[in-house]
Amino acid sequence: MKIIIDTEENLAKRAAQRYVELIKNKPNAVLGGATGSTPLGLYAELARLCKAGEISFKDVRTFNLDEYVGLDGSHDQSYRYFMNHNLFEHIDIDINNTRVPSGIDTAAAAEYDKEIEAAGGIDLQLLGIGVDGHIGFDEPGTPWDSVTHVVELEQNTREVNSRFFNSIDEVPTHAVTMGIKTIMNARSIILMAIGSSKAEIVKKFIQGPVTTDVPASILQLHPFVEVYLDEKAAALL
Ligand code: F6R
């Protein structure tokens, strides 16, 4: 595991350079996307680089980690909406080459891993981390061999995410998420964490035991993971 500690602004720039490098070598790379607050700086930087002609997503395909059950892509809290508005509309990607699990047709979740495999597998998966160690919506206790599936969200995750909704009652109770195995199948992974609220879990997942109690701890066993942290998130390492 390679650890990179820098300011939030520099982390976005440095992570974006990994995408520039990857896509230069493999213009039809398959990217794994994440939502949440953490990747916003990176997505803005990728959009800037694309406008400047330094990167092109023309032949890139993407698969997002997760989606809320019950929200379709026109709902402003759906992850499809998030991706369109924060990244896809600002880069030269073909929207038909972008996939987000369906929150409506949840039976399609069973095909998601096969679709990823048919696309050649994910070259670079982006992850954030929840304060309970979740990656995607794989909460503590998720089996290591899980593939894309429907999950019930932890109360804590719903509370944390309620900041984007009018009230906690509006936060969906379930989500579709790539499984731990789906994520571990990616050829390389970038996990980003920003801010002091992540400091404890960052220490646990990097320096603690590999345990399903801390889903992100499995990344210790992946051959190519880079962890991008600001100084606050890295404070307890
Ligand atoms: C989002 C996702 C989640 C978030 C995590 C951190 O697609 O899969 O695991 O990465 O909840 O969220 P933020 O970045 O908002 O702190």
Image: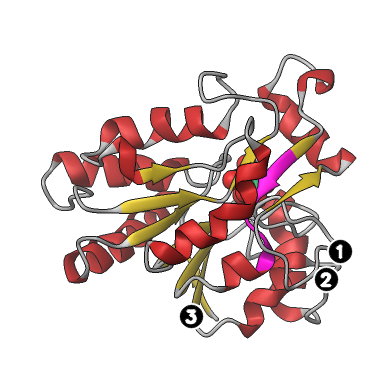
Task: Give the structural element (helix, strand or loop) at label 3.
Answer: loop
User: As rendered, which of 22 and 123 lies closer to the eye?
Assistant: 123
User: As rendered, which of 159 and 152 lies closer to the eye?
Assistant: 152
**Is 101 left, or right, of 7 in this rendering?**
right
Q: Is mark 2 within 8 Å of ligand 1?
A: no
Asked if the stretch drawn in magenta spans residue 118, the answer is no
* Relative image position of residue 194 (x, y in whole percent): 58, 52
Give yes or no for contact between labels 3 and 1 (Cβ–Cβ under 8 Å): no
Which kind of residue does numbered mark 2 sit on?
Thr
Pick out the residue farthest to the left. Answer: 53
Among numbered discs 1 and 2, the one appearing first in the sequence: 1
Whether residue 192 appears in this view of the structure is no
Pick out the residue farthest to the top. Answer: 166
Mark 1 — residue?
A: 141
Label 1, label 2: how many angstroms apart (C-alpha)? 5 Å
Quadrant for residue 145, please give it: bottom right
Task: Give the structural element (helix, strand or loop) at label 2.
Answer: loop
Q: How many marks on residues? A: 3
Task: Give the structural element (helix, strand or loop) at label 1.
Answer: loop
Among numbered discs 3 and 1, the one appearing first in the sequence: 1
Mark 2 — residue?
A: 212
Location of the N terminus by quadrant is bottom right
Give yes or no for contact between labels 1 and 2 (Cβ–Cβ under 8 Å): yes
